[in-house]
Amino acid sequence: MPDTALFTLASGSTIRAALLGNAGLRFDVAPPTLDEGRARAQYRQAGLDAGELALALARDKAVEVSAGRDGLILGCDQILEVEGDILTKPLDSDDAHAQLARLSGRTHRLLTAAVFVEGGCPLWQHLAEARLTMHPLSSGFIDAYVARTWDRIRHSVGCYQLESEGVRLFREVEGSYFSILGLPLVEVLGFLVETGRATT
């Protein structure tokens, strides 16, 4: 494994960093300052669907970070869509309750995008889709769940974490586990290996 970083992760996500680190990759971290809410609204107004939106935001994050750094930059984004509506990270615990009530008993999609950029130019992108179906949840259960897990779910789209207690909410899960956590790890590793940036 080389002593220098293979790339810079344009994300402040601790789970993405943990997934990459557990895979034995050396990388730097530089969270972007992109106003995601504003960018998301502009792209939606322009007519982008959920997958296109995830790719656009991942690209924008990587391009922004690449303006101040050399080398390969990895941008990521994840969009949750339920019956045509897009949900974002909860504003507060009341919003978390409302989101979980919206997802209760329904199937939603998670669109997870990864984009590699170098010198401001996109080199590679991948979009993964997962479909998750929740059990019907009572209001009382949601209240207790949010109160118990708020510190962990407050930064999570959909207000759950599949890697912890949130897995109990689901009746069916289809898709890559890594992508559901926020990073299409196998595909990212494939790009690095196929381009000779990492070895197997």
Image (cartoon, helix red, strand yellow):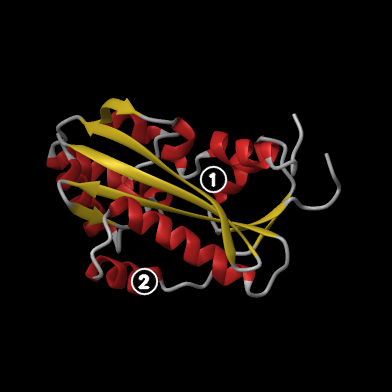
**Mark 1: amino acid:** Ile
Instruction: Name the residue tied to disc 2.
Output: 39
Q: Which mark is residue 57?
A: none
Q: Secondary structure at mark 1?
A: helix
Q: Secondary structure at mark 2?
A: helix
Q: Residue furthest top?
A: 171
**Left or right: residue 67 compared with residue 41:** right
Instruction: Name the residue tied to disc 1.
Output: 15
Q: How many marks?
A: 2
Q: Give the vertical position of 21 relative to 77 (above or below).
A: above
Pick whichever, 45 or 11, lies toward us. 45
Q: Where residue 35 sits: x, y (%)?
A: 42, 73
Pick whichever, 20 or 187, lies toward us. 187
Please identify, in this view, whether the residue under mark 2 or under mark 1 is nearer the observer.
2
**Mark 2: amino acid:** Ala
Identify the residue shown where x is 85% and y is 44%.
Answer: 2
Identify the residue shown where x is 32% and y is 48%.
Answer: 159
Q: What is the C-alpha distance between the residues marked 2 and 1?
A: 23 Å
